Image (cartoon, rainbow, N blue to C red):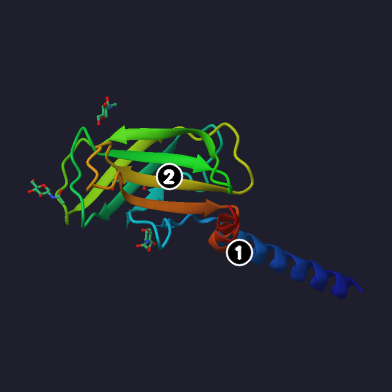
Amino acid sequence: MKNFIFTFILFTFLLTVNAAQFQLNKRAITFQVCSPDFTSEFVNATIGTDPPKAGNPESFNVSGTLTKCNITKGQTFLRIGYTDFSIKPIGDYYVQNFTDNFKVGTPFMISASNVPTPQQLPGQYIIVVDVGDPTRDPNKPVIFGCAFAVIGGSSEEFFDIYKLI
Ligand SMILES: *[C@@H]1O[C@H](CO)[C@@H](O)[C@H](O)[C@H]1NC(C)=O
Ligand SMILES: *[C@@H]1O[C@H](CO)[C@@H](O)[C@H](O)[C@H]1NC(C)=O
Ligand SMILES: *[C@@H]1O[C@H](CO)[C@@H](O)[C@H](O)[C@H]1NC(C)=O
Ligand SMILES: *[C@@H]1O[C@H](CO)[C@@H](O)[C@H](O)[C@H]1NC(C)=O
């Protein structure tokens, strides 16, 4: 009987460790292309505190290579926003201007070290990162590059909801 209990406890422990590892893997935030039919290019991002803590400033590094647009200092911006699964914004967008020029086709990197995290975060939400330009030139897209990450759910789940709205 004692042996059985020991085995059972060990088994439960192993299950718990496995579950914890699984959740850790599941929690790691990865950014992906905004949507296949979206005209902007992919930018990638890394995040300092993963997952973000509500109310605590977050750091982001955003990088990529834009093949259609120049990044112009003081004009092109980086924007970071949180939304729920219905794409309703949570809090305000964070906006930061580029302070360097990056010619079309050259890799860029921009760090944002003090991005406010919303005071309240639902169990499932989206982080959207985009790079754009406020220019009104109709031949130039306003959003050059974009990526999003799903936290607390799967991107399949998100796209299923996204299709409904
Ligand atoms: C984005 O960056 C992460 C971390 O460096 C990397 O693992 C991932 O493959 C990148 N995603 C794409 C689509 O390049
Ligand atoms: C951003 O890049 C800098 C320099 O490479 C690095 O020190 C920092 O840890 C990075 N931060 C994030 C959030 O990835
Ligand atoms: C990028 O900027 C250069 C000048 O530095 C210009 O010649 C070129 O047309 C621009 N390309 C695009 C796609 O805006
Ligand atoms: C960012 O650039 C825009 C023009 O594109 C300007 O109106 C705004 O004041 C700039 N913001 C900062 C913080 O420099």
Quadrant in the rendering for residue 41: bottom left
Above or below residue 55? Residue 122 is below
Secondary structure under the numbered disc 2 in the rendered image: loop
* Left or right placement of residue 156 versus residue 15 in this view: left
The amino acid sitting under disc 1 is Phe
- Disc 2 marks a residue whose amino acid type is Gly
Where, by quadrant of the figure, is residue 14 drawn? Answer: bottom right
Residue at x-position 54% and y-position 45% = 87
| Tag of residue 22 | 1
Q: Quadrant of ligand 1?
A: bottom left
Residue that sits furthest to the right in the current view: 1
**Observer-nearest of 18 and 63:** 63
CB atoms of marks 1 and 2 within 8 Å: no
Q: Is mark 2 within 8 Å of ligand 2?
A: yes
Give whichever of discs 1 and 2 has the lower sequence position.
Answer: 1
Distance of label 1 from label 2 (alpha carbons)? 21 Å
Give the residue drawn at x 61%, y 59%: 23
Residue 139 spot, x, y in % from top left: 22, 48
Horizontally, residue 103 falls left or right of residue 5, namely left
The answer to whether the beta carbon of the residue marked 1 is less than 8 Å from any atom of ligand 1 is: no
Kindly identify the residue that appears in the image at 57 percent across and 57 percent down.
158
- Residue 154 location, x and y as percent? 57, 60
For residue 14, above or below residue 80: below
Tell me if I can see residue 42 in this picture: no
Horizontal arrangement in the rendering, residue 11 relative to residue 69 (left or right): right
Image quarter of residue 90: top right
Image: 33 above or below 112: below
Q: Tag 1: Cα neighbours inside 10 Å, few (<14), some, or many (≥20)?
A: few
| Number of other residues with Cα within 10 Å of mark 2, as a class: few under 14, some 14 to 19, many 20 or more | few
- Residue 48's disc is 2
Q: Position of residue 108 (x, y in %)?
A: 22, 50
